[in-house]
């Protein structure tokens, strides 16, 4: 099957990369885990404490969160409150244990994975690789791919008019419309959707609109299973093109890690 679409605009790889927030003030831990993740093409952002992490989680989207439990209660509270950060409530989380007694508490607080101290680099690499496919799925869930294709829009009782798509995701798309659209309006669209060779019909609802630019966001309400599956496959292929590590992880390839076996336990004043 040949997939037909007019023009696709690819973003740079950094904007498509898996993003992980690493919360730790321990330099050796930050350096080692950042090394492992950067070799996998993961974009790592580091902050030292719960307060700065909460601020970043409020303003940014991450696929993964790694929390150092040196300050145990602060770290556990951040894990427990992760569902409150709407954009990051499904982020894959990992706790760095300061001792084995924290393992049960970390999982009870919502951690998906744990790392134990002293950090063993091969074990840390295996854990991050195990988490990687889950982070890719989280990235794919909201991934919007820039794409331009003619889109015919009908808003009753007005006649159909032509707009252009700006980007598309599994759940909706942004369009550039010559006609003013209002939030809450139901629309019918005809377009050549990426992953489908023919014009398809989709019903949607305007979820945001910018009158000054003519742009509007459409949430899909009714889309056939066949078209939805084709669109999902096309988006995943585009995501893999932008994140080469996705294919390497799927193939089970290994990446080099630094030869050191362990890292020292962080100093804690008594």
Image (cartoon, rainbow, N blue to C red):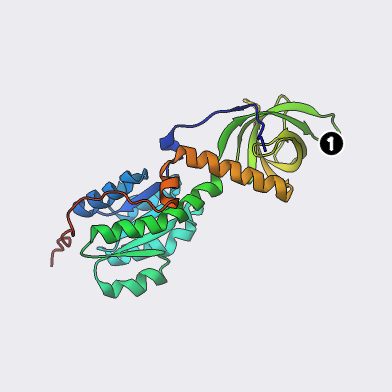
Residue 99, horizontal then vertical, whole percent: 24, 71
Please say whether residue 209 is visible from this viewpoint: no
**Side (left or right) of 15 relative to 255:** right
Q: Residue at x 35, y 72 (%)?
A: 105
Question: Foreground residue, 161 or 119?
Answer: 119
Total numbered badges shown on the rendered structure: 1
Q: Quadrant of the N terminus?
A: top right
Report the residue that reaches farthest toward the right: 157
Image x and y of residue 113, in percent = 38, 64
Which residue has dot 1 on it? 156
Q: 142 left or right of 186?
A: left
- Disc 1: CA contacts within 10 A as few (<14), some (14-19) or many (>=20): few
In the picture, measured across the screen, residue 226 lies left or right of residue 133, that is: right
- Where is residue 134? Give x, y as percent: 46, 56
Q: Position of residue 256 (x, y in %)?
A: 27, 49
Front position in the image: 19 or 251 = 251
Q: Quadrant of the C terminus?
A: bottom left
**At 49% across and 57% down in the image, what residue appears?**
90
Secondary element under disc 1, as helix, strand or loop, is loop
Q: Residue at x 36, y 43 (%)?
A: 41
Q: Nearer the viewer, residue 27 or 157?
A: 27
Visible residue check, residue 88: yes
> As drawn, is 9 to the left or to the right of 201?
left
Asked if 183 appears above or below 31 in the picture, the reply is above
* Residue name at image x 33 percent, y 56 percent: 50
């Amino acid at each position: 099957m040949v997939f037909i679409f007019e023009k696709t605009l690819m973003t740079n790889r950094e904007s498509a990369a898996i993003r992980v927030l690493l919360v730790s003030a321990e330099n050796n831990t930050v350096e080692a885990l950042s090394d492992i993740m950067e070799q996998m093409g993961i974009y790592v952002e580091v902050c030292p404490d719960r307060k700065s992490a909460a601020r970043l989680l409020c303003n940014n989207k991450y696929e993964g969160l790694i929390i150092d439990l040196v300050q145990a209660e602060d770290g556990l509270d951040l894990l427990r409150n992760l569902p409150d950060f709407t954009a990051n409530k499904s982020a894959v989380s990992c706790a760095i244990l300061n001792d084995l007694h924290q393992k049960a508490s970390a999982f009870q607080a919502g951690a998906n994975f744990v790392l134990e101290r002293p950090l063993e680099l091969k074990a840390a690499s295996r854990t991050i690789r195990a988490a990687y496919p889950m982070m890719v799925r989280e990235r794919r869930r909201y991934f919007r791919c820039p794409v331009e294709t003619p889109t015919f829009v009908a808003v009753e009782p007005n006649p159909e008019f032509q707009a252009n798509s700006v980007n598309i995701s599994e759940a909706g798309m942004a369009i550039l419309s010559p006609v003013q659209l209002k939030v809450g309006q139901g629309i019918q669209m005809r377009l050549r959707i990426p992953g489908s060779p023919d014009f398809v019909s989709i019903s949607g609802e305007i979820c945001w609109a910018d009158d000054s630019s003519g742009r509007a966001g459409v949430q899909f309400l009714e889309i056939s299973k066949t078209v939805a599956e084709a669109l999902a496959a096309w988006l995943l292929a585009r995501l893999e093109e932008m994140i080469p590590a996705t294919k390497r992880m799927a193939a089970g390839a290994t990446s080099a890690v630094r030869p050191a076996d362990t890292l020292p336990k962080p100093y804690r004043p008594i």
